């Protein structure tokens, strides 16, 4: 019987195993190289960019509204002026037990004008528990450390009792957001000067979106608005 020269040669399993090992090693080296390049980009080449992005997610900036300037008569008596007031707002929790426990804590340090039964039907709403807080009461609220409580400030424009003609000359304002805007009279004519310049603050936010109180920092102080005299556009 003739020998078949085309018959398949026996497979060398050691050569096959060595080739596969080289391929696995090559793949591992490529993977290691990709990871090394990525780490270099994150930790060295673009470290500043990633740190800035991380910081931006952790810190927030906001505006500090300026106190509106006064309107005075010829003798310097205030006819219109603004005062900053602080209100206590509460985001009503969905859980009735939490609501009851938190109201008990709040009621232990502050007098509030509502009850648990009144708030039970307003779950998820933000309601005003107190229209005006004294400075000492603000400190008590912060010491409670309740995430559903928030102290918010706003300005109130006050007026001296004068004749209707003078009231019309002085004009009126309206709160738009945190800003007092002049609508009529001198309040509108001199609105830009009366407004002043807002300041800026920076504060860190935790994972729940709440302020970390110890991190609050004033970046730029607000500048109070200019006083306006009733009989002229500038102080004498």
Image (cartoon, helix red, strand yellow):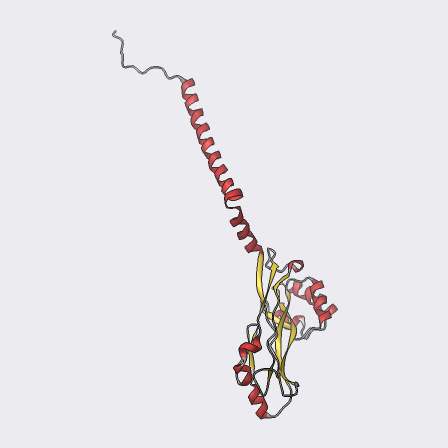
| Quadrant location, the N terminus | top left
Would you identify the image quadrant in which residue 69 lies?
Answer: bottom right
Residue 70 image offset from top left, x and y in percent: 62, 80
Would you identify the image quadrant in which residue 199 lies?
Answer: bottom right
- The residue sitting at the front extreme is 236
32 vs 167, nearest the viewer:
167
Residue 152 image offset from top left, x and y in percent: 63, 70
99 vs 134, nearest the viewer:
134
Residue drawn where x is 54% and y is 79% of the image = 191
Residue drawn where x is 73% and y is 70% of the image = 136
Would you identify the image quadrant in which residue 114 lies?
Answer: bottom right
- The residue sitting at the left extreme is 2
Judged left or right of residue 137, residue 156 is left
Residue 89 image offset from top left, x and y in percent: 63, 70
Q: Up-down: is 27 above or below 205? A: above
41 vs 116, nearest the viewer:
41
| Quadrant location, the C terminus | bottom right
Q: Up-down: is 165 above or below 17? A: below
Q: How many marks?
A: 0
Residue drawn where x is 47% and y is 31% of the image = 29
154 vs 88, nearest the viewer:
154
Residue 64 image offset from top left, x and y in percent: 60, 68
């Amino acid at each position: 019987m003739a020998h078949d020269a085309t018959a398949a040669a026996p497979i060398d399993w050691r050569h096959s195993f060595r080739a596969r090992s080289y391929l696995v090693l090559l793949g591992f080296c490529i993977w290691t190289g990709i990871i090394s390049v990525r780490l270099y980009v994150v930790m060295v080449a673009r470290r500043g960019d990633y740190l800035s992005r991380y910081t931006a997610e952790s810190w927030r900036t906001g505006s500090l509204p300026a106190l509106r300037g006064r309107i005075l008569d010829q003798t310097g008596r205030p006819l219109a002026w603004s005062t900053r007031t602080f209100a206590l707002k509460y985001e009503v929790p969905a859980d009735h037990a939490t609501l009851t426990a938190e109201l008990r804590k709040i009621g232990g340090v502050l007098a509030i004008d509502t009850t648990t039964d009144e708030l039970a039907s307003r779950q998820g709403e933000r309601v005003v528990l107190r229209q005006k807080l004294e400075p000492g009461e603000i400190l008590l609220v912060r010491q409670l450390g309740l995430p559903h409580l928030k102290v918010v400030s706003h300005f109130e424009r006050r007026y001296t009792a004068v004749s209707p003609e003078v009231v019309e000359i002085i004009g009126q304002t309206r709160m738009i957001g945190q800003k007092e805007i002049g609508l009529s009279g001198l309040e509108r004519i001199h609105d830009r000067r009366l407004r002043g310049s807002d300041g800026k603050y920076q504060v860190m936010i935790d994972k729940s979106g709440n302020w970390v109180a110890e991190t609050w920092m004033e970046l730029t102080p607000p500048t109070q608005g200019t006083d306006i005299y009733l009989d002229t556009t500038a102080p004498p």
